[in-house]
Amino acid sequence: MSDLLSSLREFTPERHGEQGVDASIHGVVEDSDEIHEVFCNPPGGSWTEFDIIHPTNDFISRWDHIPRRPPRVKRPDQVFQYNDGETLSLLTIESKYELSDLTSDIGDRLIGYFEGHDNYTGLRQRPCWHQKTPHGKWNVIPEEASEDQRYWFRDYPDVKYLSGFMFANSPLNLRDRDEIDEALEQALSNSDVHVAISVSWTTENQYPLLYMKGDSEFRTTAISTVLQSALDAHNSDIETP
C-alpha cells in the first residue's frame, strides 16, 4: 500500500486536459473573498446549478436543471460574479485545452446563454426556484411567490456581461512570458471575448500558473481588478524553477 501511495504522489500527467484548465481557475476563485463562483463545470462544481447573489440584499438565488446544449448559444464552463455597488457583473468563460479550439463568436454565444433568443429561453428569463440568506439554508421558493422574488434577475436593471476564453498554454512546461502574452493577444484578436486567460504548469510540481489579458473594456471594470489580484496572489504562492 505504501508503494502505491508513493507512486500516486510522484505521478505527473503528460496532459492535463480541459478539466485541468477548469480546476485551475476554480482553485483561484475558491480562495477569493471578493469573487463569487456562480457556476463551474466539474471538478469542483455542478453540471446544472447557477447561484447568483442579489447585489442589494445578498440573498443567493439558484437556478437548476438548465439546458446543457441549448441551440445557438453556449453554456459557459465558468461563470464568476462581482457586485460593484448595485452593478451585477458576470464574467462567462469558455475553457479549452488548445488555443486552436477558439471560435470567433464564442463571447456572444456565452452571453446568449443568459440572454436567450427566439428559440431558447435564457437563464435570465427563467424563474429561480431556490433561495437562501447569506448565512441561512436553502429553501424552495413557493409556487405562490411574487415575480419580484422569482424573477428578480430578469427585472434587475444593472447587469453587465463580460466574456472570456481560457486555455492551456503548455502541457508541462512554463513557457517564455513573451510567448504567453502573444497567445493571449491572439485569443483576443481572433474572437469577440473581453478577456483571455492561459494556464501553464511548472515542470517540477505541476502547479498551474495563470496569466490574463483583457481588452480595453474589460480593463476598466472592477471584476478585472479583483481577478487580477487573485491571480497574482495565486502565482506568487507557487515556487517556480
Image (cartoon, rainbow, N blue to C red):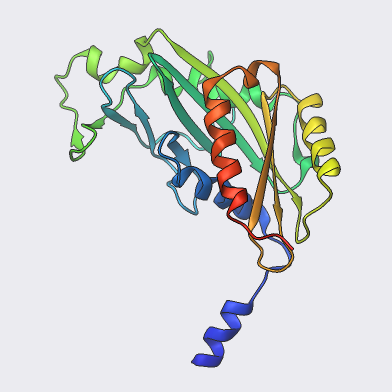
In this image, 144 relative to 177: left or right?
left
List the single residue furthest toward the top: 157
Q: Position of residue 235 (x, y in %)?
A: 62, 49
Placement of 177 over or under 123, stated as above or below: below
In this image, 153 relative to 72: left or right?
left
What residue is drawn where x is 30% and y is 15%? 152
Placement of 73 over or under 204, stated as above or below: above
The answer to whether one can see residue 72 in this image is no
What residue is drawn where x is 66% and y is 45%? 210
In this image, 88 relative to 21: left or right?
left
Q: Position of residue 126 (x, y in %)?
A: 37, 21
Q: Position of residue 172 (x, y in %)?
A: 75, 61
Q: Position of residue 239 (x, y in %)?
A: 65, 60
Q: How many marks?
A: 0
Q: Quadrant of the C terminus?
A: bottom right
**Quadrant position of residue 193:** top right
What residue is drawn where x is 80% and y is 42%? 180
**Quadrant position of residue 132:** top left
The answer to whether one can see residue 25 in this image is yes
Q: Nearer the viewer, residue 28 or 68?
A: 28
Q: Nearer the viewer, residue 154 or 13?
A: 13
What residue is drawn where x is 57% and y is 79%? 8
Placement of 122 over or under 171, stated as above or below: above
**Quadrant position of residue 194:** top right
